[in-house]
Amino acid sequence: MLVRVCLLLLAGGIAAQHSRVLLSSDHRAVLLVAVAACFCCRRLRGAGLVLLGYWLLMGAGADVIDARLQPRYAGDSLLTTVSICSAAKTVAGSSTFCVSPLSDKRLPTRSSVSWYMPAVTPGVGEVWQLELRLRRPRGLRNPGTFDRETWLFRKKIHATGYVVTGKRNQRLAVATLSLTDTFRRDFVEQAYRASDSAAAVLSAVGVGERASISREQWDRYAETGTSHLMAISGLHIGLAAAFAAVAGIVFSGWLRLPGNPRTYGVAAGCLFALVYALLSGFGVPAQRAVLMLWSALVLLLWRRRTNAVAILAAAAIVVFVGNPLALLAPGFSLSFAAVLVLIKIAAEFQGRAQGRLVRRLLALRALVKMQWALLFGLLPFTVLWFDRIAFAAPVVNLIVVPVFSAITAPLALLGMLTLPASNDLSLQLLKAAALSVDAIEDVIAWFAAFDFLSAEIVEPRGVMWCVLCLPVLWVVLPRGWPGRWIAIIAVAHIVSYRPIPVPTGCFDTDVLDVGQGLAVVVRSQSKILLFDTGVRYRNGGSVAEQVLLPFLGSQSQERIDVLVVSHADDDHAGGVAPLLKSLPVGHVYSGEPLRPDVNNLSRCKAGMSWRLDGVDVHILHPSRPGLSGNNASCVLQVVVGDYRMLLTGDIESAAERQLLKFADIQSDIVIIPHHGSATSSTPAFVEATRPRVAIASAGFANRWNFPKTSVVRRWQSIGARVYTTAESGALSFRVCEKSGVSAIVEQRLARQRFWHDGLMP
C-alpha cells in the first residue's frame, strides 16, 4: 500500500516538474478540490494521489517564485542591513554567501551575493550594512550544461547579485550563532588545525560543510564514483547510528537498565543519527536515513516485522510531502534508488548457508555484487545528473569504503564528540582521521589518472532515453535470465553512442548563451570550428569551463579543428587558455595577438579561406595590417551552396565601411556586430547584408543595454528576424545547400520549466 502511494505521489510531482506553466492560486485551489473529490471515490484515489503530488510541487514552487525579488528593484543599488545566513565560499578572491534582510521589505528572504576582494570575509550570523545590486534568479541556458536557474530554485534562493565595493559596507554586529552553527564553525576550525590537506573532507564528513572542497577534488570523485563519501548520506548516518547503538547496548548493560539492551541500542542510534543529521544540514539523503532508522525503532517497539521496502516508501513520502522541491535534487533519486538496490541484493543473500567461513565468503561476494549492482542500477540517474559513467567505482569503493567506514568516519565522529570536552584529544583524533583521508585521496587520484575508467556520456536524445534505462535489468531480473545481458549491451551502446553526424553539404551552428560575450560553434560532417571563446571571470573560472567544454562534451566533440578568436578583448578571448589546456586544437586564427602566447597562431587577413567537409570559410576582414581593438576583429563568412552566414566579432562603423568596399557581405544569417552596440550596425551595413536572421549575443540586463533598441529596429526594418541570447538562450540551427536555413531552436524556450524566469529583469 505504502509503495503504491509513494509511486503515485512521486508521479504527480514528476509531472509538475516538467510543466512549463505555473498554476495560479485559483487553479491550484480548483486542483485541490479535484483531489478531494477523487479521494471520495475509491476507484479514483490513485488519480487523486497523482493530482496531490502535482499540487504539492506546484504549490511549493509557487511559494519560491512569489518570494523572488520584485522586478522594480532589479539592478538598483540597495543600501540595506542584512544577516549572513551561510558560510562564504571564496574562489580567486571572490566570496559568495547568502544574506537575509533584517527589516528591509525590498529584499527577498534569501539572496545569494558575491563580493570581490572583501577586506573581511563575512561570517555566518554576522550583521552587515551592504550596498547590493540584485536581480531575479537567472542562469545561462545551453544544451548539455549545468542549469543554474534550477539549482537556485530548489535551493530556494530568491535573488542573486553582488556587493558594490565601497566604504558604506561595514559590519554592524558580530556573529550571534545558534549552538548548532557554533559547533559547526568550531569543528571546521579544528579540522584545519588538524590538517590543511584533509580539512575540507573532514569538514564534509563531520558537519556537512563542503564549500572548501576544490573543483579538482570534485572532478576526481566524479570520475571514480566516490562523490557519495563527501555528502552526509545513509553511509555516514548508518555508521553514526551503529556507533551510538553499540554504546547504548554497552551502557544499558553496565547500568543494568530494565528491558532489552538492543532496544536501548537502537534508540541511542536513532537519537544520535538525528543529532548528526541536523549538524550536517539535514540534506535529503540524511533525511531518508533518519526516517528509516526511526521507522525501524517504532516497529521494534511495537514488535512488528520490518518491511524494508515499505519503510523506504514511507520515508520517500515524508521527504516529498515535507519539501516537494527535494524531488528536483540529485540526492533524492540517487539516495532512494541506491537503498532499493541494496535491499534487493540483501534479499538474495538472506537465509543462505550457516557455516561461518561460508557466510563470510558469501558476504564478500555480496559486497562485490553490491558495487556492480549500484553501478548498473544507478546508471540512468548518474548519466542524467552527471553525464558520465565511472567504471572504476566498484573497485575504488571496495577499497576506500572499508577504510572510510572503519577508520575515517569513526575517528571524525569521535573527534567531533570529544571537541566540547577535550580540545587536545579531538585534535589528535582528527589528525589520525586526516591520515586515512590522505590515503583515500591517493587511491582516488591513482584511479582518476586512467581516463578510460571514466566515460563522459553524450546527452541522450530520443530513443536513447529508453536505452538508458536498460542497464537496470541487471538488478531487476533474476540471475540466469537471458534478458539480463541486454544491460551489458545497453551500457556498451550508451558509452559508444555518438550523435548523428551533420549531413554532407550542411553545417550546424550553435550561438551559445555566454552572457556578455560571444562563442559560436560551427560543425560540418567531421570538422568543428569555434569562433570566440567567451569571457574569463575576474573571480576565477571562465565561460570556456562552464559552458563551452560541457557543451562540446555533450556533443561528443573531442577536438577543435579551427579556433578563430576575433580579437583580444576578454569577452571574446577569455576562454582561450582553458580550451587549449583541455582539448587539442588544430589551428588558431586571431585578429590581434593573444595573451598568453599561442602556438600555431596566424593573424587573420582578408582573402584567407579553407574548406570543412564541403563548407567554405572565408576571412573578409581585416583587409590591412596594423588595426587594433574592436576594428581588428576577424570577420568570417561561412558558405554552403548559395547560403551564407556572417560572423562579425566586435567590428564598428569604420570596419563596416571597409567591408562594404572590399567584400560581398550579403548573408542569410548575421551575428550582429559588437553585441548590438550603437557604434556598429550602420544603416549601409545592415542594408548590404540583408539577412533573414540576425542574432545578438549579449548578457541579460547588461549595463550597456545591448542590443540597443535602435539597432534591433534597424535590422528588423530590412525584414530580419532578430534573436538575442539574453532572451532565447543558446540558438541552434542547420544550414544546407539544398534546403537552406532550418527552424531556429531557442534553448530557453525548448526546455522551459515553470520556475525559469521570464524576460523581465
Image (cartoon, rainbow, N blue to C red):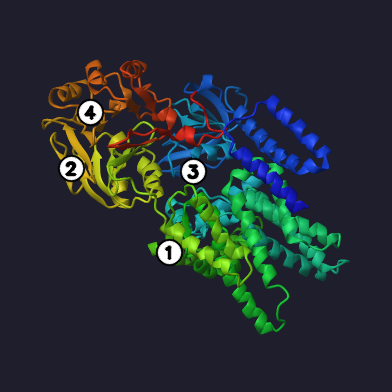
Q: Earlier in the sequence, mark 4 or mark 1?
A: 1
Q: At numbered mark 2, what does the secondary structure look like: helix, strand or loop?
A: strand
Q: Earlier in the sequence, mark 4 or mark 3?
A: 3
Circle 1 or circle 3, nearest the eye: 1
Q: Residue 191, can we see it? A: no
Q: Are marks 3 and 2 in contact (CB under 8 Å)?
A: no
Rate crowding at label 4 as few (under 14), some (14 to 19) or many (20 or more) other CA atoms within 10 Å.
Answer: many
- Amino acid carrying label 3: it is Lys
Q: Residues under labels 2 and 4: Cα distance? A: 24 Å
Give the vertical position of 568 relative to 444 (above or below): above
Q: Residues under labels 4 and 3: Cα distance? A: 36 Å
Residue 723 in the image, given as x and y percentages of width and height: 38, 26
Q: Which residue is mark 2?
A: 610
Count every numbered label the image shows and give the total.
4
Q: Which residue is mark 1?
A: 453
- Amino acid carrying label 1: it is Leu
Task: Judge by depth and name the residue closer to the eye, 623 or 289.
Answer: 623
- Amino acid carrying label 4: it is Asn
Circle 3 or circle 2, nearest the eye: 2
Q: Residues under labels 1 and 2: Cα distance? A: 37 Å
Residue drawn at point x = 63 percent, y = 38 percent: 16
Give the vertical position of 678 relative to 214 (above or below): above
Q: Earlier in the sequence, mark 1 or mark 3?
A: 3
Q: From the viewer's perspective, tell me whether residue 305 is left or right of residue 395.
A: right
Q: Which residue is mark 4?
A: 630
Q: Which residue is mark 3?
A: 89
